[in-house]
Amino acid sequence: MQHNILTSIRSTKITDGCKSNQIYALNNSAAANSPINAVVGGGDSIGEKLFHHLLDRSKTSGRTKPVGPKTATLEALLPCGLPSSELLEPSIEPCLKPFDLVQTLAGVRRRIEGEGGKFEAFLEQCLVFKGFFDSKLFRRSLRSARQHAVDVHVKVVLAAWLRYERRDDELVGSSAMDCCGRKVECPKASLVSGYDTEPGFDYCSCSRKNNIIVDNVDVECECSTSYEDGDCHDMSFCIGDSEIRCSRYFMASLSRPFMTMLYGGFVESRREKIIFSLNDFSVEVMRAVEVFSRTKRLSQFGNDLVLGMLSFANRFCCTDMKAACDAHLAALVLDMDDALLLIEYGLEEMAYLLVAACLQVFLRELPSSMQRLSVMRLFCSVEGRDRLAAVGHVSFSLYCFLSQVAMEEDMKSNMTVMLLERLGECAENGWQKQLAYHQLGVVMFERKEYKDAQNWFEAALKEGHIYSSVGVARAKYKRGHTYSSYKMINSLISDLKPVGWMYQERSLYCIGKEKAMDLISATELDPTLSFPYKHRAVFFLEENKIGAAISEINKIIGFKISPDCLELRAWFLIAMKDYERALRDVRAILTLDPNYMMFYGNMKGDRLVELLRPVAQKWNQADCWMQLYDRWSSVDDIGSLAVVHQMLENNPGKSILRFRQSLLLLRLNSQKAAMRSLRLARNHSSSAHERLVYEGWILYDTGHREEAIAKAEESISIQRSFEAFFLKAYALADSCIDSESSKSVIDLLEEALKCPSDGLRKGQALNNLGSIYVDCDQLDLAADCYKHALNIKHTRAHQGLARVYHLQRQPKAAYDEMSKLIEKAQNNASAYEKRSEYCDRELAKNDLSLATQLDPLRTYPYRYRAAVLMDDHKETEAIAELSRAINFKPELQLLHLRAAFYESMDDYVSTVQDCEAALCLDPSHAEVLEICNRARQKIIDGK
């Protein structure tokens, strides 16, 4: 049993997450799914006494001595003093946070697989994933929701939302109304009603279509008629002294009212001349209506006339003419000026498509369009919402999008409150009300309106959002009811299966050992929560244990990079006068978030860099390159990021530095910041061939492999370069891995190595070339590549060389090689994990235990331990080991393995639930689908 299960884990490629040296290997972490992972292989002082105590200690600590003039005093660098544990408080997350995430995702999956309501199910899935802080899952669900949208309004909203999610990534010269090349985001495709039969991620052909399409009928097409202008004019409409000759038949065909008037029992049906002066339409409009009645064409009329015809069509229920005018006017809306001019006409005349086109501009121009008073009055006010609703342009998805943008711009603004109130009015089912009420509670809490916040949190809790209990308790606490808050969270822990955030929240209402124990429990249940680490670190600082404080905050920085934790460490380092490392952390913060405010929001990060620069080591550009080599080779990603930030200060337009920055950010799992850097690299490119390479990486990273290869080939046709060959090799290797393509990848990497580049990039190319040789069973050639990479300090090549030794049946050599990597690498959780494959079970357990301590987000150790327990027939313990990780990281392979375990235990209901949740993460996973179908059949047979 033992051999079978452990072998099964490896045979199903669960261990592939550790093989980062393979070009096309899939890693467990989100960052490793990107090509670039493989490419680079406030407040008050806690007291004057403590402040000066640390100041005195730092003078004799023996830490790094400042170089250069001491232009900044410690007081100037720490204007807010030292951090205080009393001022630390975890934020209340403004997102859907289901208590049982697996059960929620399984329910969403069942609705997706059902007959109707796919759009709503995908939207819920999208907003659940918003709380995952995984942009790829969120965007994929948003694209699926857009693909399953039917009406124009929802398409416009979701296409604009998709564009907003990549707003910082725009290429130079692009505008909000440009099509990115995909139907799901195309502004023209959004104005077509009906379900898209083609996959929404397909290419968009809008560039070949110049006309707006309504219900799949081209309203600009000509309708031929056998009547000449003079042959069919058998009646007249008289306006003032003017007489407009018309065809009774064609005018009657415009609408039922005209049919009744001209062919019914009214006197007009017997008259040749009909007085039309009292209807307030001009002679020109009436003549245009007459022409349209025969030709069904609008192209010959000016825009003012079409507006008049739209009003005429509304008055007399001329459906076809209204649709034509609506589409014609919608096609005129190209920018903000057009939208602001025409939106009132659209609302007044109930022109659905025209309003959609104007709405689309407003949404695609977010957040800048929020500065337009008329736009925000339309969205925020009850009157504006009613006007939009009357024409069919109000929805939960609209206000969900708008409120997200508003919260990101200014959480406390009146505009944010009003948009969330409109969101609550649009909420129909339980999860929608949970989200709207909870977000209103969060905003009111941030505004310090605690009574209102408590009411909204209680409303969300009543709808079933258990996490809103945090908001209720916190609001009560702020209002002075500490015991009531404690009692409420304590009841949750007693009545429900406790989770990390419960203990974290209860700790706020405790003191002493009870507080410390709650924070320990919170970390055990959910090690991704940053507040417990931060609080313990500051507590150590207050106890004059600054070394322990830095060690504590280092624990979470080691596996989860965030600006707030880096800020806290920088704060400690400044207090120690270790300005070198403090400046490193501040530079890393500004790379992650260029607008970050330090010290409770009281100092700009850029300003702190200015203050630290004179008292830190000064490097010229050559020194920076040497420092970058050292940090890169020691797998010090934060240090490397800081060096690149300094190099960009000296040379902000250097594309290659932006590119390297993006590689490091992806390794740190900061996907959004990485893409921003990659776009900047493209935008600052000094040559066409360089720009094409960066465009290729952008395409690859967004799932367009074939287009990426085409960009690489185009770049090579202009100039042969390392990066172009490398890009093509990488994209080709990830597309197919047969023997023929492997030979092509080898040739491309060899061509890349012939081109000029630096050791950092050539080391990666050699590493990737070695992995291809391994897969082609050419182990000696692979070993040569890895050894050559190690000679130029590509430290990660130790892992590839260890793999070669393992395949050559040299386990001791493989183990020793990984030990070398552990010694050299600063972040070595993955190295411990990989080394565990090259030793016996006991040593493997020790290595995996260390890997979990260093990085609890790595899931292979949990899966391995669970498999060992299953081998020993300890099914309950095996399930518990997997569940421990799933509770804070519901990852595909964890759910897959637990489903398999449940199936082996004949618990088919739990099997199906885990499979359905896993399919939300990867809808096309063949093995999960197979297990799910098998378990469903067992349930049916059991009935």
Image (tube, helix red, strand yellow):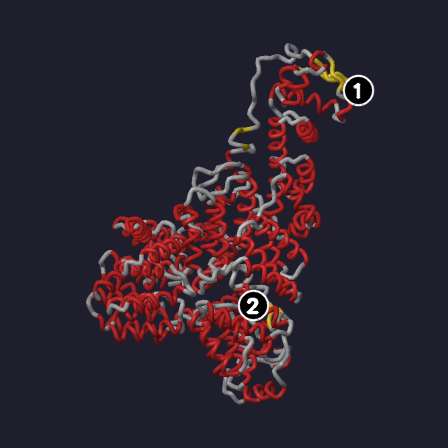
Viewer-proximal residue, 769 or 239?
239
> Which amino acid, by three-letter code, is at mark 1?
Gly
Q: Is 501 left, or right, of 797 in this rendering?
A: right
Q: Classify mark 2: helix, strand or loop.
A: loop
Position of residue 456 measured from the top left corner of the image (x, y, whole percent): 61, 60
> Would you name the residue on which mark 2 appears?
91
Q: Please tell me which residue is depicted at 46% across the width and 45% down the height of the picture.
A: 118
Pointer 1: residues within 10 angstroms few (<14), some, or many (20+)? few
The spot of residue 611 in percent (x, y) is 61, 75
- The x, y position of residue 583, in whole percent, is 54, 74
The residue lying at 44 percent from left, 60 percent from top is 101
Q: Nearer the viewer, residue 156 or 628?
A: 156
- Mark 2 or mark 1, whichever is nearer to me: 2
Q: Is residue 906 above or below residue 89?
A: above
* The N terminus - image quarter: bottom left
Q: In this rendering, does residue 467 appear at all? A: yes
Q: Amino acid at mark 2?
A: Ser
Residue sitting at the far right: 241
How far apart are the alpha carbons under marks 2 and 1? 70 Å
Given residues 289 and 181, the one toward you in this image is 289
Name which of mark 2 and mark 1 comes first in the sequence.
2
Q: Residue at x 50, y 42 (%)?
A: 149
Q: Is residue 549 above or below residue 447?
A: below
Whole-percent x, y for residue 440 in the image: 61, 59
SS of the residue under disc 1: loop
Res 426 label = none
The disc placed on residue 240 is 1
Q: How many marks?
A: 2
Would you say residue 71 is visible in this rendering? Answer: no
Q: Residue furthest front?
A: 943
Could you classify mark 2 by the number of other residues whose Cα lies within 10 Å: few (under 14), some (14-19), or many (20 or more)?
A: few
